[in-house]
Amino acid sequence: DAGITQSPRHKVTETGTPVTLRCHQTENHRYMYWYRQDPGHGLRLIHYSYGVKDTDKGEVSDGYSVSRSKTEDFLLTLESATSSQTSVYFCAISGTGDPYEQYFGPGTRLTVT
Amino acid sequence: AQRVTQPEKLLSVFKGAPVELKCNYSYSGSPELFWYVQYSRQRLQLLLRHISRESIKGFTADLNKGETSFHLKKPFAQEEDSAMYYCALSIQGAQKLVFGQGTRLTINP
């Protein structure tokens, strides 16, 4: 496995609380991505980053924000969690040499009650 | 707009039978397509890409631009092929992928 870790791996939180998920890589890859995985919807891109402090929205960015202050860390924040954000969240990375092959983290299962 | 469609959420075949997982795409640019796989308790990983024209674990996929399809095929399914399969389309110049809804393949003994 590529050097990608996600924390926490599991989280249960209440509606309205803020939540931050962390993705950490040791590969020094330029690109980092956050996806959510839901039955019937597959993988949908939330936000991605193409460098430190450079981020852009994906197709389901509402209710989420991201930050990347270091190459190795990409944070996903749910400012005020809602039940519709219950999902499995995956981080992925890719390098400049092959930006289209993405390496995925183990996932974070988030439950919003 | 770019879109990837996998019409089958679930697919079940018997061991030794041929398997085909369907993928159709919509994209105005020059497509580059991939198949990713997620085995039980493992990370999502790249299975193959069309540009390589290779066979991985007995699977092949041919890009058909006329039918805008990239179906994944294997002539003789094995139990270890049971997994979730995602078709993905690259977006030129944006360094990102668009994934389909996924197909869960189950190989019965």
Image (tube, coloured by chain):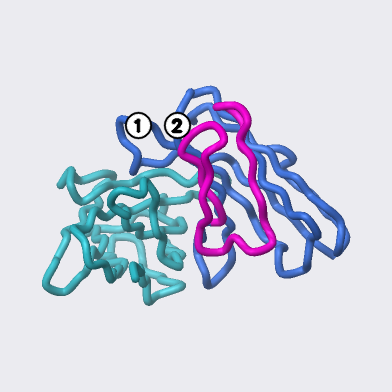
Q: Is residue A71 magenta?
A: yes
Which disc, if any, is residue B109? none
Per the image, the residue denoted by label 1 is A96
Region in magenta:
A46-74
Q: Residues within 10 Å of mark 2 (few under 14, many from 20)?
A: some
Up-down: is A6 above or below A89?
above
Up-down: is A28 above or below B88?
above
Q: Nearer the viewer, residue A9 or A75?
A: A75
Chain in blue on the image = A
SS for dot 2: loop
The residue depicted at 69 percent of the width and 62 percent of the height is A63
| Direction from residue A44 to residue B21 in the image, left or right | left
Residue A86 in picture, x, y percent from top left: 72, 63
Give the residue type that dot 1 points to.
Answer: Thr
Chain in cyan on the image = B
User: Mark 2 near mark 1, Cβ–Cβ under 8 Å?
Assistant: yes
Q: Residues within 10 Å of mark 1 (few under 14, many from 20)?
A: few
* Numbered-mark total: 2
Per the image, the residue denoted by label 2 is A30
Residue A7 in picture, x, y percent from top left: 71, 38
Residue B14 in picture, x, y percent from top left: 36, 67
The residue depicted at 48 percent of the width and 29 percent of the height is A2
Q: Chain of mark 2?
A: A
Q: Chain of mark 1?
A: A
Earlier sequence position, callout 2 versus callout 1: 2
**Residue lying furthest left in this view?**
B66
Up-down: is A86 above or below A47?
below
SS for dot 1: loop
Give the residue type that dot 2 points to.
Answer: Arg
